[in-house]
Image: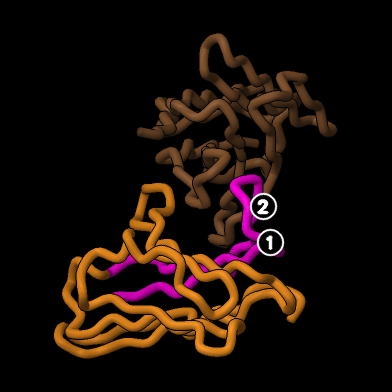
Chain colours: A orange, B brown
């Protein structure tokens, strides 16, 4: 697509439920990144993919968080057994190539609220 | 370790004033990249500029200018003749030459009053 698309834009869930956040990157972009942004803070790296391969998941807070990108395009970030501390804006970004010089194009984000 | 510090949490100025947003970074990489992103009230993150560590030339784009000084590890952003539409949170970010992660500052909220 023309931009990075994320869904849902807003998700309210009860503690203990699983949630899945979806990211559709710009067509042809090799790298896809997940960031989390708490209110009043800068984004925090979670994980990233080159094509379908998850290159680094060191930023995932714990094993309740997982991500996949099975066909090298759309990615899903899954949070199991959600907790209130998981409430945040989850941002997906993509870039044309993999490089530290990459300019990331961000989606509008998925705001997760865990009650 | 890499770190980005934006010491100004919030700045409020009257329209048409000039304003400078500070960014100080720490890195041991000799090759690195610095970025500024804008987050308007609508919430998206919009890329403004990228600078590599070998290019210390200042850049001007319309009312925006950036001052990169390796000697003080700073990459400051100045808006000249500010406008209400400039109101946003501005983030400075850093990536090392071999590091795919962007390390972000906490952001500076800029309020431009009419």
Circle 2 is placed at which residue position?
A103
Residue A61: image location, x then y, percent: 24, 64
Q: Please say if B25 is above or below B72.
A: below
Q: B86 above or below A28?
A: above
For label 1, the crowd category at 10 Å Cα-Cα, with few meaning under 14, some 14 to 19 and many 20 or more, is: some
| Residue B38 appears left or right of A82 | right
- State which region is magenta: A87-115
Q: Determine the residue positioned at 28% across, 76% down.
A: A65
Residue drawn at the location 33% of the way across and 66% of the way down = A88
Query: On the picture, is B23 further left or further right than A1?
Result: left
Mark 2 and mark 1 in contact (Cβ < 8 Å)? no
Q: Residues within 10 Å of mark 2 (few under 14, many from 20)?
A: some
Counting residues from the N terminus, which is met first, the one under dot 1 or under dot 2? Answer: 1
Q: What is the chain identity of the residue bearing mark 2? A: A
Which quadrant does the N terminus of chain A fall into? bottom right
Q: Position of residue B112 (x, y in %)?
A: 60, 36
Image check: B71 left or right of A86?
A: right
Q: Is residue A113 above or below residue A85?
A: below
Whether residue A105 appears in magenta in the rendering, the answer is yes
Q: Residue at x 66, y 63 (%)?
A: A95
Q: Image point 79% across, 30% down: which residue?
A: B63
Front: mark 1 or 2? 1
Query: Does dot 2 land on a helix, a strand or a loop?
Result: loop
Is residue B52 visible from the viewing direction of this image? yes
The residue that label 1 is drawn on is: A97
Quarter of the image for residue A56 reads bottom left
A11 or B56, which is in the foreground?
B56
> Where is residue B36, by image quadrant?
top right
Residue A93: x and y, percent? 57, 65
Query: Among all residues in the image, which is located at the extreme top?
Result: B71
């Amino acid at each position: 697509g023309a931009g990075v698309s994320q869904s849902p834009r807003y998700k309210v869930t009860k503690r203990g439920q699983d949630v899945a956040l979806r990211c559709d990157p710009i067509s042809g972009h090799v790298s896809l990144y997940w960031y989390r942004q708490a209110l009043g803070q800068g984004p925090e790296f979670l994980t990233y993919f080159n094509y379908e391969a998850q290159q680094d998941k060191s930023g995932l807070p714990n094993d309740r968080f997982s991500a996949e990108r099975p066909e090298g395009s759309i990615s899903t970030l899954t949070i199991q057994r959600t907790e209130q501390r998981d409430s945040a804006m989850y941002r997906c970004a993509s870039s044309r190539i993999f490089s530290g010089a990459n300019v990331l194009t961000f989606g509008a984000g998925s705001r997760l609220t865990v009650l | 370790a890499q770190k980005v510090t934006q010491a100004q949490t919030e700045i409020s100025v009257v329209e048409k004033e000039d304003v400078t947003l500070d960014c100080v970074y720490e890195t041991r990489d000799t090759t690195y990249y610095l970025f500024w992103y804008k987050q308007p009230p609508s919430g998206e993150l919009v890329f403004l500029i990228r600078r590599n560590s070998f290019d210390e030339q200042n850049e001007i784009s319309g009312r925006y200018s950036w001052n990169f000084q390796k000697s003080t590890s700073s990459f400051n952003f100045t808006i000249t003749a500010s406008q209400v539409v400039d109101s946003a949170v501005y983030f400075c970010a850093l990536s090392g030459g071999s590091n795919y992660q962007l390390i972000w500052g906490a952001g500076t909220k800029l309020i431009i009053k009419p």
